[in-house]
Amino acid sequence: MSLGTRGDVQPFVALGAALKRRGAQVTVSTGAGFEAMIESAGLTAAPFFIDYQSLLQQPDMQAAMHSLSGKLRVLRQSRDWLRKELEEQWDLAKAIRPDLIVYNPKAPMAPHVAHELRAVAVPAVLQPVLAPTGEFPFMMMSSRSLSRVGNRLSHRLATGLAHLLNGRNFKALAASRTDVKLSAGLDELIGYAPGGRAVPRLHAYSRHLVPRPDDWPEGETITGYWFRDNGEPDWTPPADLARFLQSGPPPVYVGFGSMPSIDARKTARDAVEGLRRAGRRGVLATGWGGLDAEVAGDDIHVISGAPHAWLFPRCAAIVHHGGTGTTHQALRWGRASVVCPIFGDQPFWARRVAEAGGGSAPLPMKRFTAERLAQRLEVALSDAVCARAEELGRLIRAEAGAERAADVLEGVIKG
């Protein structure tokens, strides 16, 4: 179970594919619109009602990404569909009757239904948000250290808020569905196993970007990122994209995934002007973020999207928003990044990439201009940064995160 955008779903499909290769029957439950991706991996799709692509296009959701008042407004409006999501998590799991549920904590019903089914529920995250540490703060509160004490307190505060919000939603659900059994004492962030056995928690990101904190307890496992494939060799590019790639030196990729832009036309113009100031060709991916496409030229090729695992190795550098998936894909192929964070975990990954030497200093989207982009590209494309990005790529490829996670889960089932 995982809820969110493509970056929240695709890693779980990769894990599902690794488990299927070992003989498991795998169902992926997530928002609507990902069925084709799930089924192409040989897995069963059991979608929830919510469509995150449509949701992200709503004005209130776009406002929530850029202001505190917008976030609070969306939080108030989300109560009904959050409760409906909990109902669906319960009903789908009861229908499927799994032996093991691997879940992002955005699906907090998982341990409760696992308790009902005498199954195992294992939490899995794409960011270091589960275990408190003094080494860095909770990422959505600060991208800079708050001191060891402050850092730990920030994690505990975030955990407390999650429990508070989940508790309210569980209470509302219990009042309307007497058949839903919520088990007292279960912690949605810890997981569940029959008999009180300890449950590991999986952290699906690279230890070369976030080393394992020294103050973490046992059971916190950094597996490496869960990549779905080795380059999608069967994907065939459109003829115009293939011609563009062959007609000159490797271009710079610019795309911001599922993040709606404040001003799509201005962002696209600044991106193109920045590329030209840097003397670079570019591939501009409009994506869910709706970058304006009226910028094509001999040196700029516009696409709606392409598999990152296919396109990134053919590019010189990657300009992106800093989602965990895009961040890891860029470095996986040894490509330096210019990260332009917007909200959420993106400022955290932007700083981690820069600190690891795999890209330029962050360029927050609210400060995005052609001049600043050209300056960041000069750094990202320097010999030293490109060499470090290549080194990080070798390290990240060697982690085999999905396979390592599958090893851990097999141990849980057999244990």
Image (cartoon, rainbow, N blue to C red):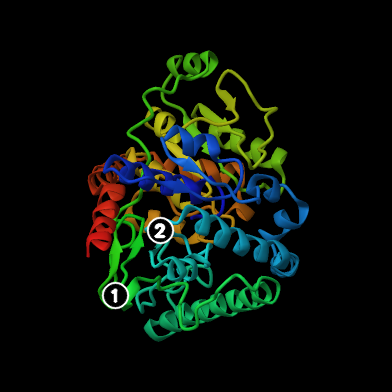
Q: Tell me the residue at 50%/41% (across/down).
A: 319
Q: Tag 1: Cα neighbours inside 10 Å, few (<14), some, or many (≥20)? A: few
Numbered disc 2: secondary structure: strand
Q: Quadrant of the C terminus?
A: bottom left
Residue position marked by numbered label 1 in the rendering? 197
Measuring from the top left, give residue 67's x and y in whole percent.
70, 64
Look at 57% across and 25% down and name the residue there.
300
Q: Amino acid type of disc 2?
A: Val
Based on the displayed image, in which of its 4 quarters is residue 135 positioned?
bottom left
Return the x and y of residue 172 as percentages of the image width and height. 68, 75
Q: Position of residue 291 (x, y in %)?
A: 66, 37
Instruction: Give residue 396's position: percent from left, percent from top.
Output: 28, 47
Residue at x 41%, y 35% (from the top left corner): 42
The quarter of the displayed image where residue 33 is located: top right
Q: Tag 1 or tag 2, which sits nearer the N-term?
A: 2
Numbered disc in front, either 2 or 1: 1
Any part of residue 415 in sight: yes
Residue 398 placement, left or right of 192: left
Dot 1 amino acid type? Arg
Q: In the displayed structure, would residue 177 be above or below residue 338?
A: below
Q: Which residue is mark 2?
A: 102
Is 301 above or below relative to 355? above
Residue at the spot 52% in from the left edge and 13% down from the top edge: 239
